[in-house]
Amino acid sequence: MTYEEAIAQLETLARQAEDGTLPIDQLAAKLKDAQQLLKFCQQKLTAAEEEVQKLLNASKTND
């Protein structure tokens, strides 16, 4: 799964919760899904930030 796909799923879940189309019986399961998607996105962002920092540091040492 990509970061963009995870964000799209989170947006869908949020929209369903806001407009009331998320069945109450599925709320707990969907909340658990949302938590996993948020964790996945955070990990992706952290990894990307670390990679950018490595590249910036490498370019500084090469100057």
Image (cartoon, rainbow, N blue to C red):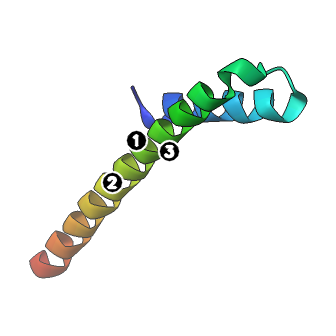
Mark 3 highlights which residue? 38
Q: Nearer the viewer, residue 21 or 47?
A: 21
Which comes before the other along the chain, label 2 or label 1? 1
Q: Are marks 1 and 3 in contact (CB under 8 Å)?
A: yes
Question: Whole-percent x and y of residue 35?
Answer: 51, 42
The N terminus lies in quadrant:
top left
Residue under pointer 2: 48
Residue 15 or residue 24, whichever sits in front: 24
Q: Which mark is residue 9?
A: none
Q: Which residue is mark 1?
A: 40
Q: Position of residue 45 (x, y in %)?
A: 40, 53
Of marks 2 and 3, the one in the foreground: 3
Residue kind at label 3, given as amino acid type: Leu
Q: Furthest-right residue in view? A: 19
- Horizontal side of residue 62 vs 11, given as left or right: left
For the residue labelled by badge 1, is the local secondary structure a helix, a strand or a loop? Answer: helix
Horizontal and vertical percent position of residue 6: 51, 32
Position of 20 compared to 58: left or right?
A: right
Question: Cα distance, mark 2 to mark 3?
Answer: 15 Å
Give the mark nearer the N terminus: 2 vs 3: 3
Amino acid bearing label 2: Ala
Q: How far from the left and from the top, in percent, is residue 36? A: 45, 38
Element at label 2: helix
Query: Farthest left residue?
Result: 62
Taking depth in this image into account, of 55 and 9 the one nearest to the observer is 9
Give the answer, above or below, for where 51 lies relative to 59.
Answer: above
